Image (spheres, rainbow, N blue to C red):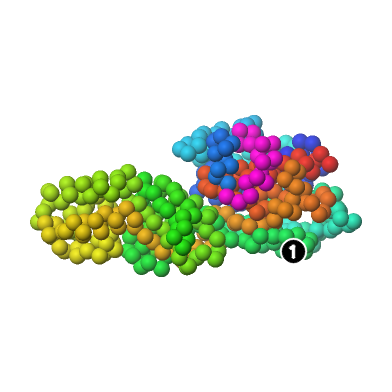
Amino acid sequence: MMAAAAASEKCDDVVLIDKNEKLGKKLYITGKGRCNLTNACDADVFFDNLITNPKFLFSSFYGFDNRAAMDFFESCGLFLKTERGNRVFPVSDHSSDVIKALKLRLEHNNVRILNDRRLEDIKILDGRVCGLTASGEYMKADRLILALGGVSYKGTGATDDAFRLAKSLGLKTVPAQPSLVPLTSPDKWTAQVSGLSLKNVSVRLEYRKKEIFEGFGEMLFTHFGVSGPLILSASSYIKEQMYGDGLVLHIDLKDALTHKQLDERILRDFSGSMNKHLINSLDRLLPSGLIPVVIELAGLDPHKRVNGITRAEREALVDTIKDLRVSINGNRGFDEAIITRGGISVKEVDPSTMECRKIKGLYFAGEMLDVDALTGGFNLQIAWSTGHLAGVSAAKE
C-alpha cells in the first residue's frame, strides 16, 4: 500500500494486486489491533533497534524516516499519539483507521486495486520485467514491486510466495525463521507459574555461557515456557542452531538490589517472622506463585523455620532470586511469531532504489527482505521506508 501510494504520486498507471479479499489483513492485527505504526525516536535509536542488515536500510530510512511516515498518515487525516517508549499509535487505538487512511490515499491517487488475486509467475524478457500472471490472468507490467511479506500468521494470507518466486528467478534467499516469538522450555516449573507476569526485571540470554542478549522490562511465564516483550526481543538474537544446546535465560527478579542489599532485605523480613516456615516468610519479597519454585531451585526445605536458616542457605536463596534460570529449547513457530527473519538476500537488491540487481524493473519492499527489528514500531517503519523508496524509484524510471 505504501509503495503504491508513493508510486502513484509520480505515475498515473498503478495497479495494486492483493491475494486477500481486502487490504491490510496483517496490518489489522498488529499491536493487538491498535497498530504501533512507527517509533518517534531519533535515527540512532532506530538503527540500534534493527537486528539484521541495518546498513542496508540507510537510504530508505533517511529518504522516508519515522517523522515522514507520521506526517504522511496525518496528511491522510489520521490523528496520532505517542506512548511509552516513543511508540506511535492512532488516537482511536484502531488499526482499521490506519488501513482506511492508506486506502483513502490510494483511491485519491486513482490506484486500481485488484483483490483475491495471487501472484503466480513473473515474466522476464532480456533481463527485464515485462509482465506477470495473477490467478490465471496475464497482465503486462514494465515495473513490478513485490511486497509479499513473511510466512508468519498464515491466517492473514502469509505464505512462502517470496521464497518460491525468488527460487524461480534464481535469486538468493536467507532461510525463514520465526522472530519476535515466544520461547519454549523443558523446565516443568514454568508451567506451575503459567500466567505470572513479571515487571521491572532484567534478563540475560546466554548461549554456551556467552551473552547474546540483555534487557530490562516485562515478561510472562506460560504453560510452554516464557513470553512477553522482553522475551520477544530476546528471540531476535537466537539462531536456529542454538535451540536446545546450552541456551539459558537468566532472570534477575530484584534488579534494583545488589546481592548484599537483597540479603539485608531478607534478614529484615525474617526478623519479623522467626518462627514461620520459610515458604510463609517471602510473601513481601516475591509473587506467591513463585515462592515454592524459588525455594526448590535454591535447594532449600520450604518447611524449615526461619530461625534455623543458615547463612549459606540464605546465600543460595539470594543467588536464585538474582539468577533464576530457564532452559530454552525452541520457539512457538510461525503461527505465533510476529515477524519472519530471512527472505530475499539484501545482496540481490540495490539499497538506494530497492531494485533487483539482476532483473530490471523488479523491486522489493518490506518483510520479504532479509531485514528485521525489535518490537516498538520499528518493523512497520521498515515497511513504510522500503515501500516508499520502491514506489518512488519505480515511478521515476
Query: Residue 298: in sight, yes or no?
Result: yes
At 42% from the left edge and 53% from the top edge, which residue is drawn? Answer: 204
Q: Nearer the viewer, residue 2 or 236?
A: 236
Q: Say if 41 sits above or below 264 in the image.
A: above
At 49% from the left edge and 55% from the top edge, which residue is drawn? Answer: 212
- Name the spot of residue 190 as percent of width and height, x first: 36, 62
Query: Residue 363: in sight, yes or no?
Result: no
The crowding category of the residue bearing disc 1, from other C-alpha atoms within 10 Å (few below 14, some 14 to 19, many at least 20), is: few
* Position of the C terminus by quadrant: top right
Q: Amino acid at mark 1?
A: Lys
At 49% from the left edge and 63% from the top edge, which residue is drawn? Answer: 331
- Considering every residue shown, the one lying at the far left of the view is 275
Name the residue tied to disc 1. Answer: 167
Q: Nearer the viewer, residue 301 or 17?
A: 301
Q: Quadrant of residue 7?
A: top right
Q: Is residue 307 magenta?
A: no
* Secondary structure character of the magenta stretch overall: helix
- Name the spot of residue 385 as percent of width and height, x first: 66, 41
Q: Nearer the viewer, residue 112 or 71?
A: 71
Q: Which residues are magenta?
A: 51-68
Q: Is residue 55 magenta?
A: yes
* Position of the N terminus by quadrant: top right
Where disc 1 sits, the SS reads helix
- Name the spot of residue 217 as percent of width and height, x first: 41, 46
Q: Say if 189 sits above or below 73 in the image.
A: below
Position of 72 with respect to 286 (left or right) is right
- Name the spot of residue 270 as percent of width and height, x first: 15, 51
